[in-house]
Amino acid sequence: MKKSVWTDSIEIPQFDSLNGDRKTDVLIIGGGLCGLLCAYFLQRAEIDYILVEGDRIAKGITKNTTAKITFLHGLIYSKLINSVGREQAQMYLSANKAALQEYEKMCGSIDCDFERKSAYTYSMKDRQKIENEVRALHRLGINAEFTDDLKLPFKTAGAVRVDNQAQFNPLKFIAEISKELHIYEKTFIRDITPHTAIADNGKITADKIIVTTHFPFINKHGNYYLKLYQHRSYAAAFENAQEMEGMYVDEYNKGMSFRSYKNLLFIGGGGHRTGKKGGNWNEIYDFAKRYYPDSTEKYSWAAQDCMSLDKIPYIGLYSKRTPDLYVASGFNKWGITSSMAAAMILTDMVRGKKSEFAEVFSPQRSILKPQLAVNGFEAVMNLLTPTPKRCPHLGCALKWNRAEHTWDCPCHGSRFEESGKLIDNPSTGNAKIRK
Ligand SMILES: Cc1cc2nc3c(=O)[nH]c(=O)nc-3n(C[C@H](O)[C@H](O)[C@H](O)COP(=O)(O)OP(=O)(O)OC[C@H]3O[C@@H](n4cnc5c(N)ncnc54)[C@H](O)[C@@H]3O)c2cc1C
């Protein structure tokens, strides 16, 4: 069976489910890395809060991450300087840099295999793009370097390198930080009225509510069904392959990524929009066979992340019309530092404090971006596709995922088992799959 490298041998604390009604100052919905960090910071600040998780904590995307802790997010800084200007690019960098520093501080006393590593973004063909990113990072005060001396088994056009980044074991980290938190598990929130969240066996009333459910599940506010899509990636961990001294990512979103963990080499790749075709594990296995013929596969897994319209996460007020409802989503596969940045920003906001990083992540920014047309096109095409197999979220036609034997929605990325049982949100219910 396919499973993530992290899920072997780590015991995560378990919590009771909600039974009855509760009141609190801040309610957090969703116990992945982002929600748990919000809870951790609120606890540290002695704020009354409750976190509810529909399943068990860290059972969502977080258990399938490759856990690189870096502010080098592909080639984002040259793009941000062009699209939102230098000031906001600097804000994005500062938030993610502060997140890295906070991990460094916290991991000092947590046994979670935290290691300092250099981060690399490489390009297969385009040296110019890499040079532009190095220049952008210099403009923002980061000592980045161009290098074409990479310890990868294939030729590239070069890479940008930033030192003093990190990697860790995310589930060891979560096992430790979640021990003392106020959590209800197996408590799936079906709906929210302005200050009350409704679960099957009770409701929770709160002054403020933070939604960290990966894909925000409330459709009537915020237009997240227009602002987000999901991108699926595949990963495998191999024994008897090369040890990587750094963490590597291709600038191309269908390219490959690499890092080591103990005696294992992780290879990521085969990515595609959820519900569409892509290379999946076959691409990784072909690669391993070609470059590491003596290697053996020990683990393999897949996961997806929410992609925003402009490569910047949505962190802040859920919508203009919901003053006490907050959200963090759209991490674009950089959710380790982005979750930490979100927890810093949102726990300031719910306490009425102004966050120095908030502006660039505001979910209320313009949605007029080219990706909006792509998302709109997918929605129209799949709404019009005739098939009885439809996603209960907004009614798009489901597509069969041959690699994983699941029904996947190309519109917003909900996924279902062959029987129709829900695997990944934003759908909140099972699909009816008739043969
Ligand atoms: C293959 C892959 C590799 C990645 N590698 C990296 C990396 O190296 N570095 C990096 O920075 N980022 C990486 N990322 C991104 C990062 O892992 C994610 O962005 C991050 O883990 C998302 O955390 P989360 O808390 O937002 O979501 P999740 O972990 O999915 O947590 C959301 C939780 O909400 C719960 N939930 C949902 N709906 C409800 C409801 N209605 N009621 C109650 N609970 C609910 C779910 O059960 C789930 O536990 C990677 C992503 C992928 C896909």
Image: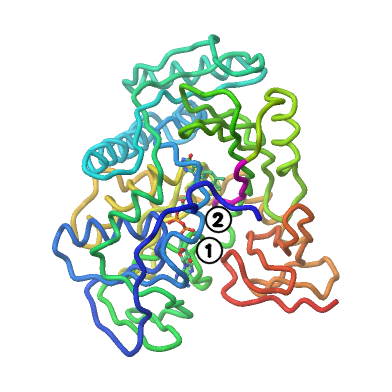
Quadrant in which residue 143 is drawn: top left
**Tag 2 residue:** 227
Residue 295 locus on image (x, y percent): 66, 30
**Mark 1 neighbour class, 10 Å CA radius: few under 14, some 14 to 19, many 20 or more:** some
User: Does the numbered disc 2 mark a residue whose Cβ is under 8 Å from ligand 1?
Assistant: no
**Mark 2 neighbour class, 10 Å CA radius: few under 14, some 14 to 19, many 20 or more:** many
75 to the left or right of 293:
left
**Tag 1 residue:** 223
Residue 88 locus on image (x, y percent): 36, 36
Please provide the residue range marked out in magenta: 298-305
206 to the left or right of 410:
left
Magenta span includes 300: yes
Alpha carbon distance from label 1 to label 2: 6 Å
Q: Main secondary structure of the magenta part?
A: strand
When the figure is inspected, residue 134 is found, relative to residue 288, above or below; the finding is: above
Q: Are marks 1 and 2 in contact (CB under 8 Å)?
A: yes
Magenta span includes 140: no
Residue 339 locus on image (x, y percent): 38, 49
99 to the left or right of 42:
right
When the figure is inspected, residue 338 is found, relative to residue 148, above or below; the finding is: below
Instruction: Report the colour scheme.
Output: rainbow
The C terminus: image quadrant: bottom right
Residue 159 locus on image (x, y percent): 53, 17
The structure residue drawn at horizontal position 36% and vertical position 49%, both measured from the top left corner, is 172
Quadrant in which residue 124 is drawn: top right
For badge 2, the amino acid type reads Lys
In front here: 134 or 292? 292
For badge 1, the amino acid type reads Asn
